[in-house]
Amino acid sequence: MDMSFVNRIKETDRIQKALQPGKSKLIMIYGRRRCGKSTLIRHLLLKKDVYFMADQSESSIQRSLLARAISEKIEGFDQVTYPSWESLFTSLNSVLNEQITICIDEFPYLVKNSHELPSVLQKLIDAQKNSKYHMILCGSSQQMMHGIVTDSSEPLYGRADEIIKLQPMTAYWLQQSISCDPVSAVQEFSVWGGVPRYWELRKEKSEFETAIKDIILDQHSVLHDEPLRLFLDDMRESVQAYSLLSVIGSGCNRLSEIAGRLEKPATQLSRPIDNLMGLGYLKRDIPYGESPRSSKKSLYRISDPFMNFYFSFVVPNASRLEAGFTNRVYNEIIKKIPQYVAHTWESLCRAAIPYIEIGGNTFNSANRWWGINSKGEPMEIDIVAESIDKKNILVGECKWSDKNDINRILHELEYKSKLLPFVEKKKIIRVLFLKESKNSSYDIYTPEKVIKLLK
């Protein structure tokens, strides 16, 4: 199975529809590194089309390399020296006998050395001087790619016919890709997350332990420095991003705690935190029912599973891993894995809530709730969500253990749910999310059910 291409059905359909013969189209595709952008594009391009991977060399060299790539489809195209991007693209349009697609991968590299390029493309599009070719522009620099087409001050604003942000995929597709049982899929997802290239690397190893050691922990392994590479795509201050996630990964979740550890005013952290949230690396938790604008109970957590694993286990052990103590570090990590996976399980369960239907009721997005209950006591509940019709409240508990006393868990949930301060006049629907359960008389969701809901 081509894992970079699992579950790209919607994206494939959108791109194929856009590339039908007729008016030339501009398609923008972006997303974090290793999410399968290039694989998706190469799969869709026809034999007559042109694929070009840009790099960070000078613009004159890049034009020469692009001309050479085009010459593989149009003989002799690289025999001419093109003094500008406009001359190259205008010449391409004049020599084509049929409409093709030209894809420029890592387009931000070209823009860094040719700031005029977006303006050149705008001019060609507006004057319809690119009528003989569709263009796909692709990049891993999410902020730059997003800004190119959504910032009203940018030349290509409003010109794109399709803008596709390729997202990491769900645990369902990881399970399909590495062929494991649902319980193992939750554990694997807590390490590799939804990035297809990580799954490919994982599948090359026979055992979970071997994969973690050889792909992440070993100082020479392919993903040992992965976060820094990701930050360099999008961050001017990659050290600051690294420091923020390191502190949060160590257990500091409140803004005041994070600022204290970094010895910086909290006001200086708003922008970098917002950037990390926009890139999908951080999330802000607030209790169910609180206003995102006014809540003072915000907790910041690492949202991407791979990054969470890395900053929870690799960064704190960096010195020992550099000294070669891979086995020793792994033996310590594996003792903490059940508790770590339990947090991933909670996140997956919350993500599945909008896809659940109970007694004809469907639900909005779920949050945790923590605060003071109606008895004046501190209390937490893993999952709270309101039904679409606002008449019901779903409350749920998540457990990640091999043996559960279902009656005890349900009794505790019944007790706690009645003490929530916002359940008056609403029907309470109680749901358990358990690692394993043979009891079907309650609303119990196991990994098999949850993962299927996230398809």
Image (cartoon, rainbow, N blue to C red):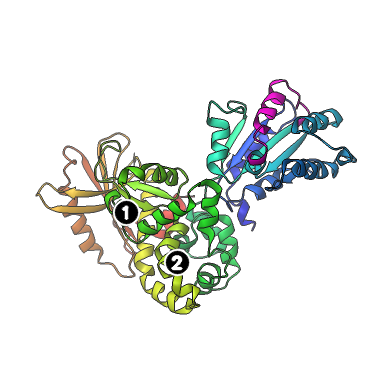
In x, y percent, where is residue 449? 42, 55
Callout 2, which amino acid? Val
Q: Which secondary structure, mark 1? A: loop
x, y percentage for residue 143? 52, 40
| Residue type marked 1 | Glu
Q: Mark 2 points at which residue?
A: 314
Count of numbered labels shown in the rendering: 2
Q: Position of residue 293 (x, y in %)?
A: 29, 36
Q: Can residue 304 be seen in this view?
A: no
* Image: 282 above or below 316: above
**Residue, far top:** 127
Label 2: how many residues lie within 10 Å, few (<14), some (14-19) or many (20+)? many
Could you tell me which residue is drawn at 58 percent across and 41 percent down? 10
Dot placed on the residue nearer the N-terminal end, 1 or 2: 1
Q: Distance between the residues labelled 1 and 2?
A: 23 Å
Range drawn in magenta = 112-133
Instruction: Evaluate whether residue 130 shows in this view.
Output: yes
| Mark 1 crowdedness (10 Å alpha carbons): few <14, some 14-19, many ≥20 | few
Going by the image, does 336 lie left or right of 214? left
Instruction: Using the rendered view, name the quadrant where residue 196 is placed.
Output: bottom right
Snapshot quadrant of residue 198: bottom right
* Residue at the disc numbered 1: 263
